[in-house]
Image (tube, helix red, strand yellow):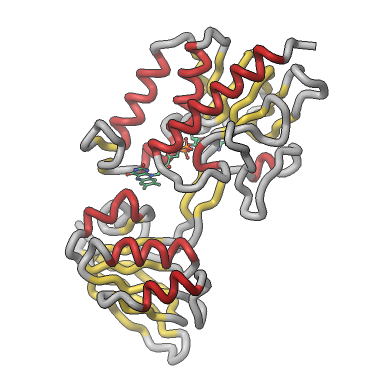
Amino acid sequence: PFEVLVVGGGPAGAAAAVYTARKGFSTGIAAERFGGQVQDTMGIENFISVPYTEGPKLAAALETHVGEYDIDVMNLQRAEKLIPAKELGGLHEIVFANGASLKARSVILTTGARWRNLGVPGEAEYKNKGVAYCPHCDGPLFKGKRVAVIGGGNSGVEAAIDLANIVGHVTLIEFDAKLRADQVLVDKLQSMKNVVIITSAQTTEVEGDGEKVNALLYKDRTSGEERKIELEGVFVQIGLVPNTEWLKDSGVELTGRGEIVIDEKAATNLPGVFAAGDVTTVPYKQIIIAMGEGSKAALSAFDYLIRNEAP
Ligand code: FAD
């Protein structure tokens, strides 16, 4: 068995593994796809001290850094079940899709999250070519341009307010007849001069010239008419889904939205089980935050292991 098993190989998992390995603990990382969401990212301009990098390059750097230590990296392993230790200091078990299972005295869960997609024609084709999901990451790429934000919940309206300060024009598209965001956010958005809000609108297609996005098509759900907006960017804000389906019956406390509930030390409700990054309740999902959280979870695992002998 490992002293520490990290489940997930994104920025949070890589940071956690480097930290526990540096404490001299036997450490494993099991990940479905090492690198995580970073593998799907183009330009990264907010990883402080690195003015510009690209996702696959950063993912390779994570792998190199992890490779500097005696860490057992198990890629292409999908965890399906967590069986918590029966007694304090005992072994937790992770069961994988291939039937194998691994045991560890401490587990760090870093299985991340995924953006909910619209599922309309053009969305996948123009991902990173005008279709974006993270305003903090990609907002500045659309400086002075026209964008749409799809989704009128809190994240959509926050994104629209954020973008309206950077881009030329923002159209907010909401499927329902009214925005679901907090009134204070809606008031703020409505006060902005370069914003148009369209409700009862079903996005039907993202159009482009083969290289870049140039329009968004939607159906007016009241009249049934098809409409077209010319623009350069589309931000999809219809939800970030934590990868915790596999933890449903494990006893790990999740919120209604499926995020792992952690305290300020990255501890879950189960002793010896920690969690970090996009999969948790930590606010703001970013690479630099995931790495900080992963490091924090690792130091908490260290603290747990030195205080709780194996039974
Ligand atoms: P993830 O990166 O999601 O990694 C999760 C890991 O867990 C992966 O290895 C995955 O394969 C694995 N996993 C999932 N389920 C299982 C399972 N059941 N069993 C085993 N392994 C599993 N952030 C920025 O700071 N700057 C940016 O410019 C930026 N741009 C982005 C662009 C895009 C297109 C996307 C999608 C995200 C972007 N982000 C950006 C957000 C950033 O990528 C995430 O905040 C960060 O990757 C979260 O790290 P994480 O380690 O918590 O999770």
Answer with the quadrant where ligand 1 appears in the image. Answer: top left
Q: Position of residue 158 (x, y in %)?
A: 41, 63
Specify whether 34 is left or right of 137. Answer: right
The answer to which image quadrant residue 56 occupies is top left
Q: Residue 226 or 152: which is nearer the viewer?
A: 152
User: How many numbered discs sit on the rendered protein?
Assistant: 0
In this view, 120 is above or below 291: below
| x and y percentages locating residue 189 in the rendered image | 37, 73
User: What is the quadrant of the N terminus in the image?
Assistant: top right
Name the residue at the left extreme.
144
Left or right of residue 7, residue 192 in this image: left
Give the quadrant of residue 131: bottom left
Residue at (45, 36) in percent of width and height: 290
- Image location (x, y in percent) of residue 61: 33, 24
168 with respect to 12 (left or right): left
Identify which residue is drawn at 19% across, 64% down: 209
Q: Is residue 178 left or right of residue 168?
A: right
Q: Quadrant of residue 141?
A: bottom left
Residue 106: x, y in percent? 65, 21
